[in-house]
Image (cartoon, rainbow, N blue to C red):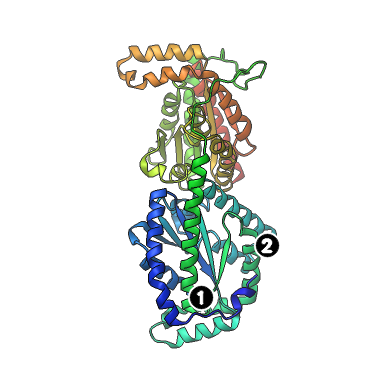
Amino acid sequence: MFEVATLGHKLDKKEYETDLPELRTQLLLAQEAVKEANFPVIVLVTGVDGSGKGDVINLLNTWLDPRYVRTHAFSAPGEEERERPPYWRYWMSLTPKGHIGIYVGSWYSDPIARRVKGILNDVELERELTSINTFEEMLVQDGALIIKFWLHLSKDVQKKRMKQLETNQATSWSVTALDKKHLKTYDKFIQIAEATLRETSTGSAPWIIVEATDEHYRNLTVGQHLLERIRYHRDTLKERAVHKPHLHPIAAPELGNHVSVLGKLDLTKSLTKLRYEKQLAKYQGRLGELARLAREKKRSSIVLLEGWDAAGKGGMIRRIIPAMDARQYRIIPIAAPTDEERAQHYLWRFWRHIPRAGKVTIYDRSWYGRVLVERVEGFAHENEWMRAYTEINNFEEQLVEGGIVLVKFWLHISSEEQLVRFKAREQTPFKQYKITEEDYRNRDKWDAYENAINDMVERTSTANAKWHLIEGNDKYHARIKALKIYCDRLERALEKK
C-alpha cells in the first residue's frame, strides 16, 4: 500500500515557487466557498515520525485565513477526558460548519499506538477501526468533508531524516527519546498502519498517501488535494440541494389494528397520598446513599426524561434532586438549538454535557428530539431521522461502555389527562408560562407523535439502554416508579463495579 510513496517523488524548487502563489489564491477562494456552503472540513494529518506533519500544518495555517481554521493536537488523555467515554474529546473538538479543522494526531493515534505496544490484539484493533468508520460516516452523512493525509517515509529515509534533525542545533529539540524508540519498531508500525488505512479508507473518507521525502512535493501535493476535495464536495452539496425534497410535517398515520406500545400501559395505576409520601421518603433516602457511593466509586449516570407535554418531567426532576448533593448533578433543559449548536452535528450538544466520573446529568428532553419533534414537525428530512436511530444506538452504546449508568424514561399520559393539566396550568399564575398555543397545536398531532414514539421505543430500546415506560396519569405512581427504577439500576451497576 505504501509502495507508491517510496518512489522518490521530487519537485524542483523553482517549479514549486512558480505554482505556489496560484495554489494559495485558490485555497483562499475555496475557503470562502466552505463558509458560503456552510459545511465543516476535517483535515487529518498523520504519518511516520519525521515526515513533516508539523511543517505541513504550519503551512496550511499560513496559506489559509487563520480566523476560520482550528488546529487540534491530541496527546495522552487528561483527567477530565479519562472520566468520560473515549470519543468525548473528539466530539468536543469537532469543527463547526463553515470552518476548517486540522488535526495532528486523531482518533487513529491511540488504537495504532496500543496495537504496536501489544495492548490491543488484531480483533480488538478491528473493533476500534469499525467504531472509527461509524464515527466518520456519521459526520459525512451530516455534510462534513473529511480529508485524511498519511505522510510517508521509507525506513532508510526516516533514519536519515532523524539524524539530520538531531545534528542540526536548530532542530535537535524535535527528536525525542520516543522518536528513537519508534524508529526501532518501524516495521511493526508500518504493518499495523497499513492494515489500519486499508480498513478505514472508505469511499466517503479515503486516505491520501503522500510521499514526504521531498518537502516541496509533499507540501504542494497536500495543498492540491485539499483544494480538489473542497471543490468537489462543494459541487456535490449543490447538486444534492437541487434534488433534495422539501421539508414537510408528517400527517397522522392510519393506525388501524396496529398495537401501540403506549396503548398497553395501564394508566389507572395510582397511589394514595399517604403511601406516596412513605415511598418517596424511602426511595429518596435510598437514592441518596447510592448517589454518595457512586461518587466514591466514580460511577456517573445519565437520567433522560422524555414524555408528552405536561406529563410531569419537571415534577419528576424535583423529586430526584433532593436526594443528591447539588454539586453532584446538572439539569440540562433541551429546547430549540442555538446558532452554535446548529453549526455542529445534532449529537454534539449532548456530548458536551456528558458527566464526569461520579456525577449525574439529567436531560429534560434529549437527543430523541431528532426522531420525535423533528420527525413529526418536518424539521428533519426522512433520511436524517431514519439514520438517527442507528446513530443514537451507537451513541448510547459508547456511554454505557464508558461506564455510565444510562436510565431512559418515557412519561406517558392520556390525551384526556393532558387536557386537564393544560387547563389547570392556565388557572395557576406561576404555571401559566408553561402553556402556549404550540402545546395545543401539538395535541392535533397526537397520533403522529404516538406513531413516532412507538418507532423510537422499538428501534432504540436495547439491552444496555432500555426504555422505561412510566404510567403518568397519577403523578404519585409515576414518581415512585421512576425513583425505584433509578435506584435499582444504580445498585446493580455499583455491585458490578
Element assignment for label 1: loop
Query: Going by the picture, which residue comes out furthest to the left?
Result: 429
Q: Percent x, y for residue 169?
A: 39, 86
Could you say which disc has been placed on residue 22 in the image? none
Q: Which of 364 and 216 is in front in this view?
A: 216
| Residue type at tag 2 | Asn
Query: Is residue 281 rendered to the left or right of residue 1?
Result: left
Q: Nearer the viewer, residue 481 or 210?
A: 210
Instruction: Look at mark 2 in the image and give the residue it sits on.
Output: 121
Instruction: Look at mark 1 in the image and give the residue it sits on.
Output: 51
CB contact under 8 Å: marks 1 and 2: no
Element assignment for label 2: loop
Number of other residues with Cα within 10 Å of mark 1, as a class: few under 14, some 14 to 19, many 20 or more: many
| Residue type at tag 1 | Ser
Which of the two discs, 1 and 2, labels the residue nearer the N terminus? 1
Residue drawn at (57%, 63%) of the image: 207
Q: Which of 74 and 274 is in front in this view?
A: 74
Residue drawn at (47%, 79%) of the image: 175
